[in-house]
Amino acid sequence: MPTTPTTHVLYLHGFRSTPQSTKARLVGEQMARNWPHIVFHCPQLPPSPRQAMDEVMRDIANWPRRQAHGPSAAGMAVIGSSLGGYYATWIAEQTGCRAVVLNPAVHAARDLATQVGEHRSWHNPNETFVFKAEYVEELRALAVPAITRPERYYALIAKGDEVLDWQEMLGHYANPYGRLQHGRLLEGSDHAISDFPDYLNEVLDFLNLAIR
């Protein structure tokens, strides 16, 4: 596993979610408490996948990247939950960074094709947004058919996920031997990974966060 210390961390929330999600807040609070010197960025993502990734890539334009003749991991890392995991995978493949994916969407275009229309935010029911039909094609354009370096990924996958198929998730992030190189396949839990606090330290350890 590459030993390049991580100095910048990006967190991407899921569909209908916000930076106020429980997992995002837990990560942010732990980072602020124990690694205040590390850059932590958790943006509110717009409903358009193209716009979301354009904005994120602008935000991280000056973050460290993998060097052509240097270490095989950049000094940045990304964490993504559900749809955010789909985005995180695309970003990891673009930048060569480590990625933590939490019940990640694998076939986002297929799954969200049924969600065209108006939605309410989970964390602010008074806030609505429209998921447009053209966003499905935008999602398809971000698909990663196969990850290139399983060792760069930590996947937390719950068999009890009531939204996504755990077998699809496992198949996408497994190494050539059919196992997760890093991460856990949880026997129960749920889509939100309600027991995420139990695995938070393990997730952060994987990122190899830089010591001041």
Image (cartoon, rainbow, N blue to C red):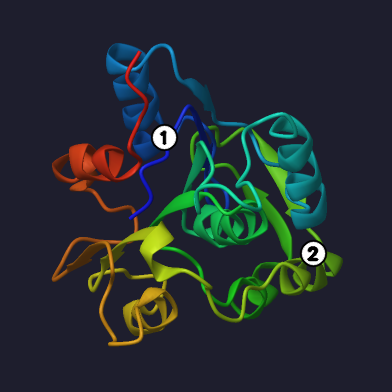
The answer to whether residue 151 is above or below residue 143 is above
Residue 184: horizontal and vertical position, in percent? Answer: 21, 63
Q: Which residue is mark 2?
A: 135
Residue 78: horizontal and vertical position, in percent? Answer: 50, 44
Mark 2 vs mark 1: give the one in front. Answer: 1
Query: Is the residue under label 1 in contact with that under label 2 (CB below 8 Å)?
Result: no
Within 10 Å of the Cα at label 1, are there few (<14), some (14-19), or many (20+) other Cα atoms?
some
Q: Residue furthest bottom?
A: 177
How far apart are the two marked residues, 2 and 1, measured between alpha carbons?
Answer: 24 Å
For this rendering, which residue is in front, 3 or 111? 3
Residue ID at (44%, 79%): 172
Residue 187: horizontal and vertical position, in percent? Answer: 13, 71
Is 115 left, or right, of 133 in this rendering?
left
Q: Which amino acid is tagged 2?
A: Tyr
Q: Which amino acid is tagged 1?
A: Ala
Is 50 left, or right, of 63 in this rendering?
right
Question: Split into 4 quadrants, where in the image is the C terminus?
Answer: top left
Q: Which mark, by number, is residue 157? A: none
Residue 24: horizontal and vertical position, in percent? Answer: 41, 34
Q: Identify the mark nearer the N-term, 2 or 1.
A: 1
The answer to whether residue 181 is above or below residue 62 is below
**Quadrant in the rendering for residue 135:** bottom right
Q: Which residue is mark 1?
A: 24
